Image (spheres, rainbow, N blue to C red):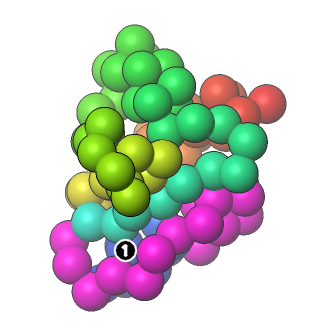
């Protein structure tokens, strides 16, 4: 729960909207960058998140809450992509 909350805070600081979650994942979307573009760029960099090209969730990344170290890598890579 602590790692999920930390992930949510970090994503929020980067401008993401994160849906409330009590699960082992979060759904997050960015107001400028599409989920599909973020997914592909993260994948190129070896960071795997889920993307579903389905109505209602096609602009969200599904991010599984991993270890603190994994979340740190994800956030660093996202920050690089967004800058």
Residue 42 in the figure: left or right of residue 22: right
- Residue at (40, 45) in percent of width and height: 58
Q: Position of residue 35 (x, y in %)?
A: 49, 39
Q: Does the magenta stretch include residue 14?
A: yes
| Image spot of residue 62 (x, y percent) | 32, 53
Circle 1 sits on which residue? 4
Which residue does the image show at 58% across and 36% down from the upper left?
34
User: Which corner quadrant holds the C terminus?
Assistant: top right
Please tell me whether residue 73 belongs to the stretch shown in magenta: no
Displayed quadrant of residue 22: bottom left
Quarter in which the N terminus is drawn: bottom left
Regarding residue 41, the answer to whether it shows in the image is yes
Q: Which residue is drawn at 73% across and 42% down?
A: 32
The residue located at (48%, 47%) in the rendering is: 59
Provide the residue span drawn in magenta.
9-24
Q: In the image, is 24 to the left or to the right of 15? A: left
Counting other residues with Cα less than 10 Å from the Cα at mark 1, is it few (<14), some (14-19), or many (20 or more)? many
Q: In this view, does 1 lie above or below 11?
A: below
């Amino acid at each position: 729960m602590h790692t999920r909350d930390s992930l949510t805070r970090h994503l929020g600081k980067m401008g993401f909207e994160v849906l409330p979650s009590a699960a082992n994942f979060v759904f997050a979307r960015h107001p400028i960058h599409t989920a599909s573009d973020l997914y592909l760029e993260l994948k190129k960099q070896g960071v795997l998140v889920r993307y579903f090209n389905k109505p209602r969730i096609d602009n969200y990344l599904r991010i599984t809450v991993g270890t603190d170290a994994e979340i740190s890598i994800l956030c660093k890579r996202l920050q690089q992509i967004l800058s």
